Image (cartoon, helix red, strand yellow):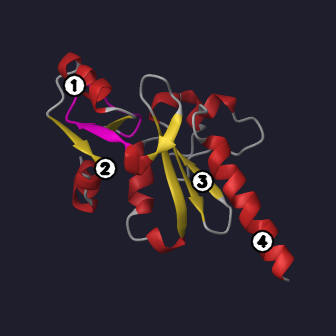
Amino acid sequence: MKFFVISLLVVVNLFATNIVNKSVLELTETNTTCPVRFIDVKKYPSYSAVIVYKDGKEEFFSSPKYMLKYYYGNEKIIKEAFVADYVTTKFFNVKDGYFVYGSNLMSIGGDDLIAFDSEEKAKIFSVKHKGKRIMPFSKVSKKLVEYLDMK
């Protein structure tokens, strides 16, 4: 039994490390249908996001907003969460991200948070697309996500 649990943990950790710095377009053996919009997130790779649950299950989302909607309140069952950098479409840990709020671009779900793996990229995007605010993940609240989802 101990061996099985250790093996399962190794597999879960392998998935998490294998997704970092990859685009959703590089994932071929995975169901990438968003549970909120019911579309393949590969259609919009710049907005893609994924949650890896502690049991090893992964769930892809068509935007950071929809992923964060699931994330908040379920942190106890989530191992890690990743978002795609808007420019490169490569996944990185959501906790390391910078998010642009209030730009003139929208995801398939409307107003959203545009994710970047560096503050510099977020600033460049914000100037170009009239972003209202740049926030590190620590400043992205559940209330903000709920507000964006109501619009």
Which residue is located at x 84 percent, y 74 percent? Answer: 4
Q: CA distance from mark 1 to mark 2?
A: 16 Å
Which residue is located at x 70 percent, y 46 percent? Answer: 31
- Residue matched to label 4: 6
Above or below residue 7? Residue 31 is above
Is the residue marked by circle 4 packed among few (<14), some (14-19), or many (20+) residues within 10 Å?
Answer: few
Q: Which quadrant does the N terminus fall into?
A: bottom right
Nearest to viewer (mark 4 / mark 3):
4
Q: Earlier in the sequence, mark 4 or mark 3?
A: 4
- Residue matched to label 1: 126
Is residue 68 visible in this depiction of the protein? yes
Nearest to viewer (mark 1 / mark 4):
4
Magenta span contains residue 103: yes
Is the residue marked by circle 2 packed among few (<14), some (14-19), or many (20+) residues within 10 Å?
Answer: some
**Element under disc 1:** helix
- Residue matched to label 3: 59
Report the predominant secondary structure element of the magenta stretch.
loop
Q: Amino acid at mark 3?
A: Glu
Nearest to viewer (mark 1 / mark 3):
1
In the image shown, does 79 or 6 lie closer to the viewer? 6
- Residue matched to label 2: 137
* Magenta residues (range): 97-109
Q: CA distance from mark 4 to mark 3?
A: 23 Å
Q: Amino acid at mark 2?
A: Phe
Which residue is located at x 56 percent, y 46 percent? Answer: 38
Above or below residue 147? Residue 75 is below
Q: CA distance from mark 1 to mark 3?
A: 28 Å
Q: CA distance from mark 2 to mark 4?
A: 31 Å
